[in-house]
Amino acid sequence: MNNKDLSCESITGITDAWYNLLCDSLKLPVNNFQLTLPAGMPGNNESLWAYFNLVPPATLKYNYWYYDQPTFFSQYAAIVQQLQFPESSFENDIGKATYAKWTAYLNSLPQPPPENTLPTVWFQWAMLNAPSVANTGRTGLACRVLIKSGLAALAPYLGPNAKAPEFSPLFSDLITTLQAAPPADLLFTSMNGNPDVSNSWVPGIDPAFFGLWTGSWCGFLLNKKFAQSAVTLSIRFEHYAVVTVTPGAWYNSGLLHLALASKSVPPWSSSAGWEKYFSLGGTLNFAIGSVLAVDGISLTLTADADFTSEEQAVITSFVEMGYWPLYCQQKIRAIKNELSFERGKMTISCHTVAGNPVLIGNNVFKINQYLGGS
């Protein structure tokens, strides 16, 4: 990163500086935090869960207009359907002679034991009859039980009449959490901002995010004028909270951990399976562990950019799209954007009505960290 990259005289620079101020002010971890551009504005469970249901890209600013990311559910479901532990693998693990004795023992019982008890039944039998493979067999049978239970939990969410994958919190629970959360006041100035993100989890320049308004290319001349002006931002969140995201009944963390922990066949049905999802370029390297949610936004931005009358007209025409840094698009009875120009100064305001949560970022974890690893 060169000195020019560390300048606030670009949309990249002021956005990086805004990122740092947000992390410093709200005690967000630069090892995990990711801005969402534009901010998420869910209105019900479905739109909230759609925001959660994402494999986030390795970028400090996630512009969902630009990145075409797979859903977390789709990757998880594809992985689970590739896992297996066939009877032949169990036989190979414990040996043919021991397998024959074990099968004879099961057949001698008045009724077959429930499948979820087989690891324990096996271990008790094997400690007397095949102690050298007692642990090996128990591990294999536990793997089979885990896979079958995971497939059973996933089944209602697959096929033509599939249920939509749910997450927690519910939309109503998010509102309740925010109502009890504290306020925050932030003051940003581009002249004193710190755009150095070299110590963050994805240091460097992110490839694509907006300029002054949602959807505008950051390279437009008027966006450069804006970034190179003296920008002052005063913002109050009546409530803010970092809210943990948890997948619903369809998800089994132990099963995903099993898939990540072993590249072998089994548990994978193919030797290429692990590489597709968990290699350096895999499709499930990251997951959202929590989100930064705010409510009751009062934002005022001023900039002394020398915009021509034509440029002012262009900027004004996009007022409904929402402006930097949150890009909150206008919503009836929920979000109001306003804009004015006078005496060489542009003033932007954004106000949201209480009870309309806005999601402005994610805490992103590498998949092994998401599953509790280091």
Image (cartoon, grey):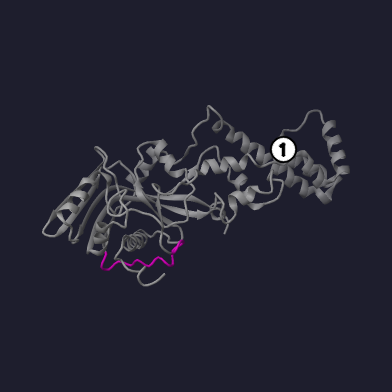
> What's under tag 1, amino acid-wise?
Thr
The N terminus is located in which quarter?
bottom left
Give the percent coordinates (x, y) of residue 244. 45, 48
Give the percent coordinates (x, y) of residue 143. 69, 44
Please give the residue where the numbered disc 1 appears in the rendered image.
Answer: 117
Name the outermost residue toward the left: 343
Q: Is residue 201 magenta?
A: yes
Find residue 303 and report its image quarter: bottom left
Query: In the rendered structure, which segment of residues is drawn in magenta?
Result: 190-203
The C terminus is located in which quarter?
bottom right
Task: Say whether residue 4 is left or right of residue 250.
Answer: left
Residue at horizontal 64%, vertical 37%?
A: 149
Is residue 1 shown above or below 278? Answer: below
Mark 1 burial class by Cα count in 10 Å: few <14, some 14-19, many 20+: few
Q: Nearer the viewer, residue 245 or 342?
A: 342
Task: Say whether residue 238 is left or right of residue 137.
Answer: left
Is residue 283 shown above or below 29? Answer: above
Residue at horizontal 81%, vertical 49%?
A: 133
Name the dominant secondary structure of the magenta segment: loop
Find residue 18 and report its image quarter: bottom left
